[in-house]
Image (cartoon, rainbow, N blue to C red):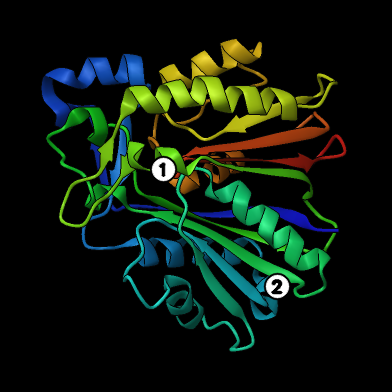
Amino acid sequence: MAYLNANIGVAFGSRRVDNDFFKEEATKISDKIGIDQRYWVKTEDAVDLAENACVDLFKKAPAFKKSIDFLILVTSSPRYALPTSACILQSKLGLPTTCGAVDINLGCSGYPYALGIAKALIFSGQCKNILVITSDTYSKYMDKSDYKTASIFGDAATASLITESPKGFELGAVKYFTDGSGFDRLIKRDGEDLFMAGKDIFNFTCTTVVKSLKEFLPENNNFIVIPHQANNFMLKTMAKLLGLGKDQFIINMNEVGNTVSSSIPLALSEMASFNTKEVILAGFGVGLSWSFITLKTNGHV
């Protein structure tokens, strides 16, 4: 079996940006997008945030550091085109040279993807303790005068442990989806700012993703969904279409914004306890890609 340790390391960009930065649009951002503040990097990058998240994780779970045998870094804002940022992290963290290291260039769907891959590595007997890191710094890609995009995104990183040790969440069913025909709906071209076709992304999420998620959800009602924290309006629309109340469909982004690949593990890390049997993680976005994974709690974590 494969388990997600309940300890999750977190890190944020060093610059806190509240809605006053966007002047006359501040109230609109708070009311519709549902974000009061976010964090942007100053001089640091995705590797720096990833390292900080790992430091935080190993303070909480120090026993695992020497036994990590694979590192997966989910990022769409790497330090270099090459080498892979995961290799840089292996060295910075002092992990053994017997540790595999790879980047996954996915955004908002990346965390469930990475958990599914980590589960497969453990099930196949290739690994025992895997470090799954998410880190994105979209503030480096944005035109900050364009509030419709800039107000949404925050910079953050998380670090998770996937192990054979039966503690935390058991990794259950996983499902992956891709529709590359929509690749240009959220894109960063060389020499250009990040572009997001907001209306198209909204329609994709509230039709295609919702349909897939409905088919993935268990028949019983003893579950909660932690979706990618895209924006308040989109998430409330999704919850309504799925027929789920606020206690079953978690929205938790007002103080950090849309942190891309880190949004799901950040929301998960802030859940104090679970009195439900299953937690469904639902990622969706750039690619276009989407993915779901079930975490089994056995009624407690």
Q: Which mark is residue 28?
A: none
| Residue in view at x 81 percent, y 40 percent | 297
| Residue in view at x 17 percent, y 50 percent | 192
SS for callout 2: helix
Q: Is residue 126 above or below residue 164?
A: below
| Residue in view at x 61 percent, y 56 percent | 114
Image spot of residue 247 (x, y percent): 65, 18
Amino acid carrying mark 2 in the image: Ala
Quarter holding residue 233: top left
The answer to whether 56 appears left or right of 113 in the picture is left
Image spot of residue 9 (x, y percent): 55, 56
- Outermost residue toward the bottom in this view: 97
Quarter holding residue 127: bottom right
Query: Which sits in the foreground, 197 or 242?
Result: 197
Q: Is residue 179 above or below residue 190?
A: above
The label nearer to you, 2 versus 1, is 1
Residue for badge 1: 259
Residue for badge 2: 63
Q: Report if residue 271 is visible in the image.
A: no
Image spot of residue 293 (x, y percent): 70, 42
Query: Which sits in the foreground, 162 or 14?
Result: 162
Location of the N terminus by quadrant is bottom right
Query: Which sits in the foreground, 43 or 144?
Result: 144
Amino acid carrying mark 1 in the image: Thr
The answer to whether 210 appears left or right of 186 in the picture is right
